[in-house]
Image: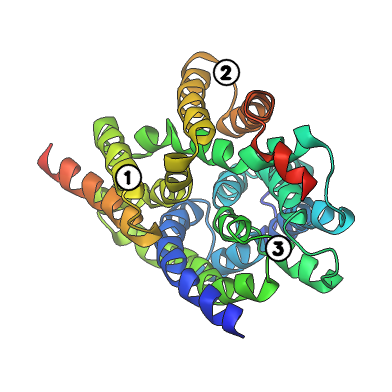
Amino acid sequence: MDAFRKGFKMGIPIGLGYFAVAFSLGIVAANAGLTPFQGFLTSAVMNASAGENAAFIAIRESVPYLQMALITLVSNIRYVLMSFAMSQKIDPKTKMIHRFILGYFLTDEFFALAISQDPYLDPYYSYGAISFASPCWAIGTAFGIVMGTILPVRIVSALSVALFGMFLAIIIPPAKTSRPICILIILSFISSFLMSRFTPFSESTSTIILTIAISSLGAILFPVKGEQDEK
Amino acid sequence: MKNNIYIYILVMGVTVFLIRVLPLTLIRKPIRNVFIRNFLYYVPYVTLSVMTFPAIIDVTSNPYAGLVSLLAGIYAAYKEMGLFKVTLICCFTVLILEFIF
């Protein structure tokens, strides 16, 4: 239970960040014609920022159901990679049910929390964080649908960067001590900018291509984990 | 014809569940391949970086406000201010800059 309490504490700033981000996502959902309950339900089921954003836009465009499945697959494909990585962080003796629950709630932030644990993740550490932050996500979305339309554009614009602030808080601290991570972040910024300005690929397609290309490059140039194999 | 939103939610819910849970449940032993281990180690940093820029300058009303917000966020994160503070600093930077310009 100590792990749960520790996780819960970590979940508070994540939850507050989630609330702000989910709020801005609620504005997108409102434009797609979702009711606050439907927005709440979507967030409770999906637990995904970029993925939900793409889905709400698809709902607005009334795409066929099969296309919705494809959009969901593409906009969330990075979770396949995270899920693979996470599989290495779970003690092989851990019960199957924990893998299901951890998978269901696998987000960028909970992933970052999980991989910071050494050598294996105690599932209850994640559950602590999830128990606070996940409801914030769903409630924030519903709240955004209710409030988003009556807030001034300026506030909405400011809230929309919350998501990226959260990402920076995850990627920058490790870059201080790891030169390879630092180089890969800079490389990612530059190539992502070039992709968005000079190629016809959508944002989610670019994300997939660049993630695979740059992570492979990193693995070839900076094999840091190689020596840990002997452990 | 307008499609049913609940069916949409069901479709995306099932898809995203399979994406997240299948690798986690099927692979229960440590991966030995050095390349794959290193690749997976770098994935989250690269994905989050790619999603952050240039999106941060595209979502704000004024792209320069987004750019300054990015720099402020990097500085705050570098100083290890934590998730919530960094997020707040990014938001307030945009709020203040867009108020002035």
Amino acid type indicated by mark 2: Pro
- Residue ranking furthest to the left: B100
- Residue ranking furthest to the top: A198
Label 1 to label 3, Cα distance in Å? 30 Å
Image mark 3: chain = A
Amino acid type indicated by mark 1: Gly
Image mark 2: chain = A
Q: Which residue is drawn at the image coordinates 48% and 45% (left, top)? A: A174
SS for dot 3: loop
State the residue position of label 2: A200
Q: Which residue is drawn at the image coordinates 61% and 73% (left, top)? A: A125
Numbered circle sitting on residue A88? none
Image mark 1: chain = B
SS for dot 2: loop
**How many labels, in total?**
3
The vertical placement of A121 against A51, above or below, is below
Q: Quadrant of residue A202?
A: top right
Q: Which residue is drawn at the image coordinates 38% and 39% (left, top)? A: B59
Numbered circle sitting on residue B73? 1
The vertical placement of B98 against A202, above or below, is below
SS for dot 1: helix
Q: Are marks 2 and 1 on the same chain?
A: no
State the residue position of label 3: A120
Discs 1/3, front: 3
Bin the neighbour count of mark 2 within 10 Å (Cα to Cα): few under 14, some 14-19, many 20 and up.
few
